[in-house]
Amino acid sequence: MFTVQNKVNWNESLEFLMIGVYDHPNKFGDWLEETSPNLQNQLKELVKSGDISAKKKSIAVVHTLGLVGPKRLLFVGLGKKKGLTKEILREAFGKAFQTINKARITAAGIMLDTFVAEGFEPEVVCEVLSEAFALSLYEFNGYKQKPNVPEVSIESLTVYSSTEENSLEEALSVGYIYGQATNAARTLVNTPPNLLTSTDLANYAKGLAEKYSLEIEILEKEDMERLGMGAILAVNQGSVEPPKMIVLKYQGKPEWTDVVGLVGKGITYDTGGYSLKPKTGMVGMKTDMGGAAAVLGAMEIIAQLKPEQNVVAVIPSTDNMVNGNAFKPDDVITSMSGKTIEVTNTDAEGRLVLADGITYAKHHGAEYLVDVATLTGGVITALGSDKTGAMTNNESLYEQVLEASMETDEMIWLLPITEKDKAKVRNSRIADLNNSPTREGHAIMGGAFIGEFAEETPWVHLDIAGSSVINGNHDLGPAGATGVMVRTLALFVESFTKIED
Ligand code: BES
Ligand code: ZN
Ligand code: ZN
């Protein structure tokens, strides 16, 4: 996939050579002198005419017409060196790779030194580069008899750099692992619900466990009954598909202490149950296991990069269907924690499965909790589709998640949970909790409800109802699942530090 070499050979044939252009009086580096005098003049002219620009994320493809070995030079605008961010760099790389890939060629090269800036050492650039490479070229093939996938795509990338090879190879591999795991999550989310049941999700997790030697436990319906997981069981009541509680464990410390619990909503399809969704609102609900996919993707990264942390991943999974056996509004159910819940809306099912998921994560020793869920339409109204809504009972833990998200450029924004909000989810005349007390601020209601099960354990809730899918194609991938929070969760775990109270 990636090869690192010391210097560009201007006599050697190459389909594409990628070059970074900063906003600087001299748009080109010393490398220009190594090329042919004729090409040098032509390139300078193209800068004057504005065809080659340093404008952020501008792409210019220049054919060299036999003047040098590389057939095409691809110039990537990066703006001012001081203004460079990881986001610009990642998206610029994504755009460049998509341009190259459209040419249906298999090999390309990149002059790494032209991208380097302060804070963007060659290793950092390599990590961003390989991540963008994986993300931007992702495709979901679909099920057409004649798939419209390209016949050829880039298979190898040569990185030309004056820096030591090993450290770059390592960075390239880390970025690629991050990108590939995100793509795996995207594929899970894009897969139609008839082809991805809870059983399929559990089998997928088993595959991960085998491949990366993770410990795995899958609770079957009978196990859930024995453990009193009345909340996930209620959601599953109307389904012919058996529910699964999927648990993956990664132990990176000698003792099973300071365990981080990652809990992902794994609703493989959400009809709303008897509080049925309107027909237009139901389409797309195959993505209601986006939280589960994010957790599985993060575990795939963690299992490969092996940080010195302990992690338990818990995925409560079922679909939310309707039949004669289905749970109903007005039902009162008992969760694993013992807390009773008055069901006022069967479409607020995510918080129910998460209730038992969180309790079970604690049962497995989780001392810190992050849950990820496509929980509410309300978060989309509040923040739009590009942001993840966050809620917490512990600012320090939230800070750590936020810091990770700023590195990965997966935007999150904190919403408050006040004492009055907590009182609302406790507002039931016949049970401890009400799963849908009001539509006002219902993203917050969802968070407040889940928080009742985290109790005193430091906890962050991430509502990805908007951010888990995107409507149009973008620099880092096609329309559809984004794989949001895979990278943030993995980075959060990698850099996690114990909170002293
Ligand atoms: N899965 C939905 C949330 C959702 C909505 C995800 C749009 C992705 C896009 C969730 O289970 C749900 O139905 N939530 C209700 C909560 C309400 C009943 C309190 C909602 O958002 O309307
Ligand atoms: Zn729902
Ligand atoms: Zn749902």
Image (tube, rainbow, N blue to C red):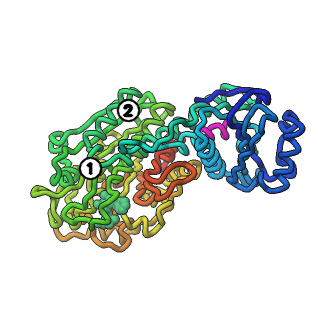
Q: Is residue 177 left or right of residue 241?
A: right
The answer to whether mark 2 is within 8 Å of ligand 3 is no
Q: Position of residue 370 (x, y in %)?
A: 41, 49
Q: Where is residue 225 in the image (x, y as percent from the top left)?
A: 15, 44
Q: In which quarter of the image is the N terminus?
A: top right
> Which quadrant of the picture is home to ligand 2?
bottom left
Q: In this rendering, which labeled residue sits more in front, label 1 or label 2?
A: 2
- In reply to whether residue 449 is colored magenta, the answer given is no
Dividing the picture into quadrants, the one containing residue 252 is top left
Q: Mark 2 points at which residue?
A: 208
User: Given the image, on which type of amino acid does mark 2 rest?
Assistant: Leu
- Specify whether residue 56 is in view: yes
Q: Position of residue 245 (x, y in %)?
A: 26, 42
Up-down relation of residue 343 to residue 69 (above or below)? below
Q: Name the residue under label 1.
A: 356
Residue at 47% x, 53% y: name it.
479
